[in-house]
Amino acid sequence: MSIIDRYVMRQVLMPFVLGLLVFTFIFIIPPLIQFGESLVAKGLSGRLVAGLISLLVPQALAVTIPMSLLLALLVAFGRLSADREFVAMQACGVSLRRLLWPVAVVAISAWAATSYVLIALVPDSNQRFLETVFSVASQRAEGEVKPRTFYQDFPNFVLYVREIPPDGRGWNGVFLARLDADQRSTIYLARHGRVVIDRDRKRIDIELIDATQHSLDADGNYFVQAIERGAFNVDPAATFSSAVAKGPRQMSIAELRAEIDKRRQLIDPATNGPFSTHNEEMEIHKRFSIPVACLVFGLIGLALGATHRRGGALGSFVIGIAVVFAYYVPLMIGPSLVKGRYLTPWLGSWLPNLVLGALGILMFVWRDRLADQPFRLHVPRWLQSLRVTRSRGVPGMTILDGYITRAYVQYVLLSAAALLGIFYIASFLDVSDKLFKGMVTTVTIAEYFRYSTPQWVYYVLPLSVLLGTLVTIAVLTKNSELIVMKACGISLYRLALPIFTMGLVAGAGLVLLQETILGPSTRKAEEIRELIRGGNPQTLNLLANRWLVGSQGEIYHYQTLDPRTHTLSGLDVYEFTPGMERLVRRSFIQTATFAGDEQDNVWDVRRGWSREFDPSGEIKSAPPIVAERRTLERADFFGTEEVKPDYMGYAQLRAYTERLRAGGFDVTEQDVALWRKAAFPFVPLIMTLLAVPFAATIGRSGAMGGIGVGIALAISYWTVISVCAALGTGGALPPILAAWAPNLIFGAGALYLLLTART
């Protein structure tokens, strides 16, 4: 290999590694938040959680290696073009075809790495992840049940335990409700209970000892039955979303071929023919076609990146994201076309490579013939207007302030656009299978993206501010502009003043977003996501399917609550003896309307039935409920629903937390979330304070050096935030310290670096 070959490969290597870290980190953020914080809060060691999350890395690498290669080529050749090095190469007789050799070496290496990941690592890591999650969850299933707290993670079951023995084994005083589709719940009252786990068979049972069953048939007949020992199977797949039989993504190629042969020998009763094997066939083809995307992206990256434009490296993010969309959208459409018999399985998997490969060849031939014709990406007028915005009329803003501000805002917007694009791609890959199976419509997916965008912006903005600050200062340093400014008597503090101001503006934007549309849009996005995944959005209804314990130990369950008229519908009331040894009375009321005042807990109840039981468990006769008055709990008692903190702003969450605290509830989780809402808007300012001295000390490495430092800081910051939040929720840290510790740690480091930096 010649010097030019090694030089080009070195230029590609740095952005490839940085892109791989960025893309993989963003793909890992959702499971990190979903699994990491909750598992740490439940007492799992950080090492075990890190090992669990690491099992998701191969699945992410299968997507991020081709993406990172494309980005690296665009950034590397974009920098060579911006610094006029590509012009010098052409003047020395180095053609585009000559540059194809080092690019081919890099692309083939990425192809080999992706092939190894998809063929060898992904099936094994996916299966190990499922088994590890099941093992961890099953080991802690019994321990997750807390006394005097309703446990609803078992599908179709609601569990309430009066007390847990000191040795932590089993439960005493168990109330178990099995929810039926017709809302006639069968309940069990047991002296003792426990969870029985068969890990080999991946089976989970709830075992009750010395229990009494209360059930109601369709004709309204009530039955009471004593059960000495009973076991109720819990669907482990629905409970932990993990303990499932091997699917195509968990199978090796040999296992997939064996599964294909097996399915072809069986008869599908729905079609009277062999079972369909298109999923398994497409999975085999994808393990060879996705790595080939590295070769396709190598060709496209060289053709798009090697121009005479001077747009710089960071602008290549936008082009790269567009090409990635153009590849992965047809890849996701393929299964739907194969299922509809419009394409064969091999063509459905190879279609994106064939289309983009042909396009890449045409672009390369065109670029090789007309290398002096730049590929132009038209900048929107609203973004162009930022370049001509004058600082005149803004008090205290000089020409230098306007220059730095315009550069900073452009880098922040480019970073935000690129990061949001990654979120859109990751989310589309996550839900696209439902779209192409005809389970949801394109409008539903678009609505999901629409309502998810505020939450993504909320998380992306601090990272964009960090990258924007790092790249702005790093580019000024690389172009020697920072040296000139210092020579003119302008200190680092003064030239960074507009950047600090914009950091405060970004924090204010987070506050505005948090207190306005963030909560409602997040709730709506989760409802749509539940619908996309085939669930019932009503399970996210904050005023539905509530279970509460009254002041006298009775259990209330209602279907819906109208807070305006204080009307309950579908109300079940279970009354027990003081020790919860047996059920005294069970009532069902179709509607109950509050008819008292603050001191009088009287309700008008209409239509229903009631059953009373003597000490031997025999049913006493009771007339049906037509219209009468009953004393229940106060009206606001039924309004203390457990609302997710993500659905509320700071003021709403504070009022809600105080209401729960006044009712005697444990509000540790709410306190942590409340303090986090107060602390998070300061993250952009902390990131800015931290980025300025870092960017001034990374030398002349330019935008790529700034991006690299930004990635390392972002990963560190998010890790500390997640760990502190989990420790706070688990009670290991006070809520205020759990929320503010990341800002205090990184803020102290930022001030030290800022005060000791050479200004």
Image (cartoon, rainbow, N blue to C red):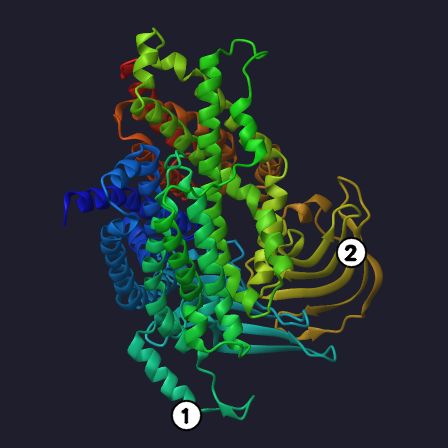
**Residue 206 place in picture, x, y as percent:** 46, 70
Q: Nearer the viewer, mark 1 or mark 2?
A: 1
Task: Give how far across and how far down residue 401 sits, in percent.
Answer: 46, 15
Count the marks: how many? 2
Cα distance between the residues tagged 1 and 2: 59 Å
In the image, taking residue 575 as reference, residue 203 lies left or right, namely left
Residue 642 in view in this figure? no
Q: Residue at x 71, y 64 (%)?
A: 587
Q: Mark 2: which amino acid?
A: Ala
Quadrant of the snapshot with the C terminus: top left
Q: Residues within 10 Å of mark 1 (few under 14, many from 20)?
A: few
Label 2: state its secondary structure.
strand
Quadrant assignment, res 314 = top left
The residue that disc 1 covers is 265
The percent position of residue 83, horizontal first and vertical second, equals 31, 32
Q: Residues within 10 Å of mark 2 (few under 14, many from 20)?
A: many
Who's the residue at 58% across and 62% down the image?
A: 532
Residue at left offset 38%, top offset 84%:
260
Q: Nearer the viewer, residue 524 or 587?
A: 524
Q: Nearer the viewer, residue 606 or 438?
A: 438
Query: What residue is shown with label 2?
Result: 592
Residue 67, x across and y down, in percent: 37, 52
Q: First in sequence, mark 1 or 2: give its number.
A: 1
Query: Is 286 on the left or on the right of 148, as rendered?
Result: left
Q: Is residue 352 visible?
A: yes
Type of amino acid at the residue the image marks with label 1? Gln
